[in-house]
Image (cartoon, helix red, strand yellow):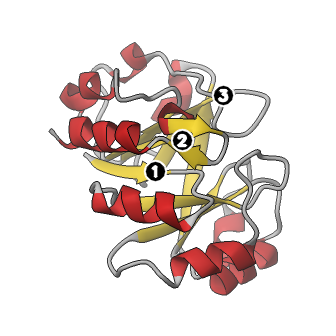
Amino acid sequence: MRVKICGITNLDDALHAIHAGADALGFVFYPESPRYISPENAQKIIEKLPPFVEKVALFVNETPDFIRSTCLQSGCTLAQIHFDVVDDFFTQVNFPTLRVIRAQKREDILKYTDEYRLIDAYCEAFGGSGKRLNIEWFEGVDCSKIILAGGLTPENVATLSEYGFYAVDVSSGVEAAYGKKDSPRVRAFITKAKA
């Protein structure tokens, strides 16, 4: 499984995650999040990263123009749309995007099966809540285009191997504090996810 470490706020955490084997890093451009980072500070981190690492920008309730311009300014390579939008919205962004499904019931995970999408547990706040989805919902489902998020930790990520998820996404499960990663937990998470 590929691994995204989300909620990156500093260069040390970014580099440690990459050296531990992360395939993608997430930068939260949602001002109400305790993991918020400004586009300027994200750019300072991203310009020091090695090549071939996906840099994912997370947005909540923003316009297509803002999303595109923030990605270009920061150096991010993918926009994660963490709120409900009409399909035309993705075309308007005019930048590589990733749809997020905030699942409340099993039927939600069966939407948009022809595209790569991130599936997270629904909560009133957006992301990083540590709330976990009912993993039984995924039994018998083709998970090869699903990036699973929500309540993942080094202690439980190995249990997902049988489902064949494309990737997993973690934030709070590998933190020492909001916006600060716990290096041993990051390494353990990535090692177990890729085992």
Query: Which mark sits nearer the N-terminus, 3 or 1?
Result: 1
Query: Going 34% across and 56% down the picture, which residue do you hit?
Result: 22
Instruction: Classify the position of the C terminus by image quarter.
Output: top left
Instruction: Specify the amino acid type for callout 2.
Output: Ser
The residue that appears at 67% across and 41% down in the rendered structure is: 178
Element on which disc 1 rests: strand
Instruction: Give the quarter of the figure containing the N terminus.
Output: top left
- Nearer-the-camera pick, 111 or 178: 178
Q: Which residue is mark 2?
A: 171
Identify the residue shown where x is 41% and y is 65%.
15
What residue is drawn where x is 54% and y is 41%?
A: 171
Q: Quadrant of residue 113?
A: top left
Say which element carries label 2.
loop
In screen coordinates, is 168 left or right of 131? left
Q: Quadrant of residue 29?
A: bottom right
Q: Position of residue 140 (x, y in %)?
A: 27, 22
Kindly identify the amino acid type of the residue bearing the numbered disc 1. Ile
Nearer the observer, disc 2 or disc 3? 2
Across and down, in percent, residue 169 comes to: 45, 44
Neighbor class of circle 1 (other Cα within 10 Å; few <14, some 14-19, many 20+) is many
Tell whether 170 sits left or right of 66: left
**Which residue matches tag 3?**
122
Q: CA distance from mark 3 to mark 1?
A: 19 Å
Do we see residue 90 in this rendering?
yes
Judged by depth in the image, the label closer to the viewer, 3 or 1, is 1
Q: Residues within 10 Å of mark 3 (few under 14, many from 20)?
A: some
Is 175 drawn above or below residue 59 in the view shown?
above
Residue kind at label 3, given as amino acid type: Tyr
Label at residue 5: 1
Q: Earlier in the sequence, mark 2 or mark 3?
A: 3
Image height of 162 relative to 99, above or below: above
